[in-house]
Image (cartoon, rainbow, N blue to C red):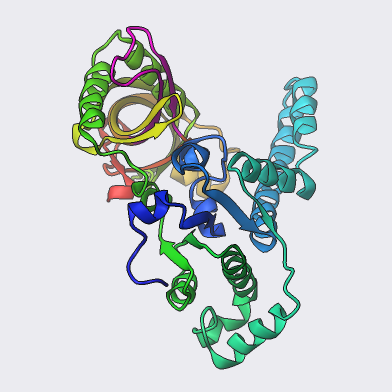
Amino acid sequence: MPLNLPSRKQIFDGEISFISIDTNVILEEGRDFNKGRLNQVPNLVPHPIQLHLTDVTVREVARHFHDNAHQLRDALSRASRLLEQHGFDSNVLTDLRSQTSNLDLPHYLDYINKYVERCRGGILAVESHDLIDRVFDRYFDRRPPFSTPNKAKMEFPDAVSLLVLEDHALRKNSKAILVSKDKDWKEFIASSSVLYHVNTLDELFEYFQATGNLQSRFKVFAIDEINQEGTPWWNSMFYAVADHVITSAWKLSKQPESSWLRYESKAIAQYPKEFMVDESSVKLWPIADGCVLEVQVRVEVDLYVEFEQFERFEIEQGLHDWYPQQIEIEDATVSINVAAFVTFVGDIENPPANPTIHVDISRGEYEWIITSGKPTQFDLVDSNNS
């Protein structure tokens, strides 16, 4: 890797011509190119920097998408058969199954290709005639990404991708920034003269932030507008937060139990109660017709939990068919932290009274641990922070 990381001058002088994102980062960001950080790549990475993915990475990501979708489709098929047996509308279920029928590999390859095009880039094919020889040279010499003996044979796709990316930078007489959490990628990049490394998209975006006095004043203005109920900024944030809360996955674990009772619980409703932007966390990037801000939002959520009570003795003896003896519904207020990207269209020096605002929040997964023994006295702890 070239000495140090690229300076802002190097980036804006065109020394960096492209970026690339490893499979592990794409999967960690939720597999969704239309929400969250992946959606913001074409906005926050400035022109003319492009996104290039190797053909190997595209196939890896598409395979992950495909396998995950088929697992969900199989689960849907099993559930729909049971629902039909209980009289659920079969036409609705047939429609659901038809919507998932096209989730084949070409569908996901096309989905990824369109995303790369949106990021002004392309798919890099394996073209070098001596690439395989160079891959095996690295394998037998135990050079990155083959440095770990017990997993070296698993690293051939990574080796091909890294050499293809390095070759492309050399042909373009430029440099590239690669985003990966993989230790072997980092070790390979450290030995390259044309590749830089960052661990996350957040680290990548840091390079392109605007930090001038005008931008700092606008951040203060935007925070006040978002936190003030009834403004266009507040309204846009509220609807985006509400959609995030309702569409995210909520999981409850560690069910309360007693010597003679067993409970099963599930979240049946979630509603945002209030929210507040963390003033110290706001970041800003210029775009052609305005700017994009990233804000961290603390959201209070009303969570309604349904507890189903079973008698342990009857379950163990098989004396009934798992229908609950009693159902109780309890409520609690829980707090979550949400990253939101706010796109503002207009003049940041003289913002209009009714601006065009769009808020982008990726879907979340929240797991809560029930800490007390009785459902009427339960507490919820975010498992990510426990």
Horizontally, residue 288 falls left or right of residue 373, namely right
Residue shown at the point (46%, 23%) measured from the top left: 243
How many numbered circles does the render carry?
0
The image shows residue 250, relative to residue 28, as above or below, that is above
Asked whether the viewer can see residue 11, the reply is: yes
The image shows residue 330, relative to residue 172, as above or below, that is above
Magenta span of residues: 338-361
Where does residue 200 sit, x and y in percent of width and height?
41, 54
Residue 61 on the magenta segment: no
Which of 357 and 67 lies nearest the eye of the viewer? 357
Q: Quadrant of the N terminus?
A: bottom left
Where does residue 208 sit, x and y in percent of width and height?
37, 45
Asked whether the viewer can see residue 72, the reply is: no
Where does residue 28 sit, x and y in percent of width and height?
49, 52
Where does residue 176 sit, x and y in percent of width and height?
50, 60
Which of 287 and 335 lies nearest the eye of the viewer? 287
